[in-house]
Amino acid sequence: MRISLMAAAACLLAGVFVPGPAAAAMRTPRAGLAAEMTGESAPWTCEIPPIRAGSVASLRAFHRAMAACADGFWAARFAAAGQPYSPPGVTITTGGDSVCGEITGTGAQYCPVQRTIAIRILKQDLRDPFRMNIAHSVAHEWGHHVQQLIGVLDAQNALYWPASESARSLLSHRLEMQAECLAGVFYSAALESIDPGISWEEWIEAVRGADESEIHGKPRNLASWQDRGYHGGAVGFCNTWTARESKIR
């Protein structure tokens, strides 16, 4: 199925839907999220502990603290919009299996059916615990949970399965880059608490220089969307669904 994503976009953002085939696949729109969840983010203060190299317990504590921080931030954003919010489950393991099967890729994934973020503690993180990189595994996957709550994942699935291979690739990129942008929105309020050990500009440059991912898309675009969320400080800046393909590839 060859669909113009401009005409049949899964959503404008956060419950504001556009006409087209995707609209029929959506649940009841939750109007107000895009309108209310805008403006500069007030600082969000969290207690994020230090990480001791080689310590699994230390990394578990870091991930748990990051999860609590992201949960509080997004719960407050949904409450401000007058919308229901529920936290995801969070599982942390040193193995490859999780409640939603094998953990692949970077060591963290979101499982929509279980509404769970599964995190795998990697050997490289034990050897060299780079705080911002580890924090991002939580922030990005929480972005997918936000997408689940507002109906974006359901809409993307409705378009994905009947689509051609090339259209599927673009849909995946739009989904992942929106999650990157939502992580940036979270960072706009919580970065100081995370104490990343790197400046925002250095972090974005590192993202831009990362290896390209077939699922996620070009690093320069991932960096651009994350930076957009950070500087915008609001979900309304994260509409990847009607962005030009050059910004998504």
Image (tube, rainbow, N blue to C red):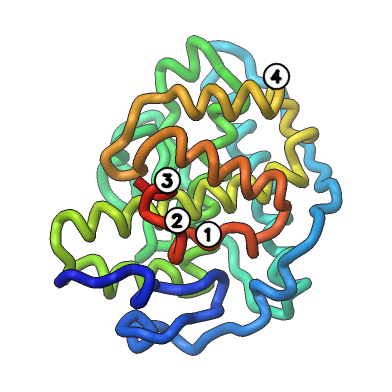
Q: What amino acid is labelled 2 in the image?
A: Thr
Instruction: Give the residue drawn at x 49%, y 54%.
Output: 178
How would you rate the neighbour count of disc 2 (Cα within 10 Å): few for under 14, some for 14-19, many for 20 or more? many
Q: CA separation, marks 2 and 3?
A: 6 Å
Sequence-first tag of 1 and 2? 1
Instruction: Give the residue drawn at x 35%, y 65%.
Output: 113
Sequence-first tag of 3 and 4? 3
Image quarter of residue 5:
bottom left
Select label 2 or label 4 by which is in front. 4
Select label 3 or label 4 by which is in front. 4
Q: Position of residue 98 (x, y in %)?
A: 34, 45
Q: Tell me, yes or no, whether the two marked residues, 3 and 4, touch with CB atoms within 8 Å.
A: no
Q: What amino acid is labelled 3 in the image?
A: Ala
Q: What amino acid is labelled 4 in the image?
A: Gly
Determine which residue is flagged by label 1.
88
SS category of the residue bearing label 4 = loop
In the rendered image, the vertical position of residue 111 relative to residue 103, given as above or below = below
Determine which residue is flagged by label 2.
116
Instruction: Give the residue drawn at x 41%, y 86%.
Output: 19
Q: CA separation, marks 3 and 4?
A: 25 Å
Q: State the mark number for residue 197.
A: 4
Q: Position of residue 34 (x, y in %)?
A: 65, 72
Q: Quadrant of the N terminus?
A: bottom left
Q: CA separation, marks 2 and 4?
A: 28 Å
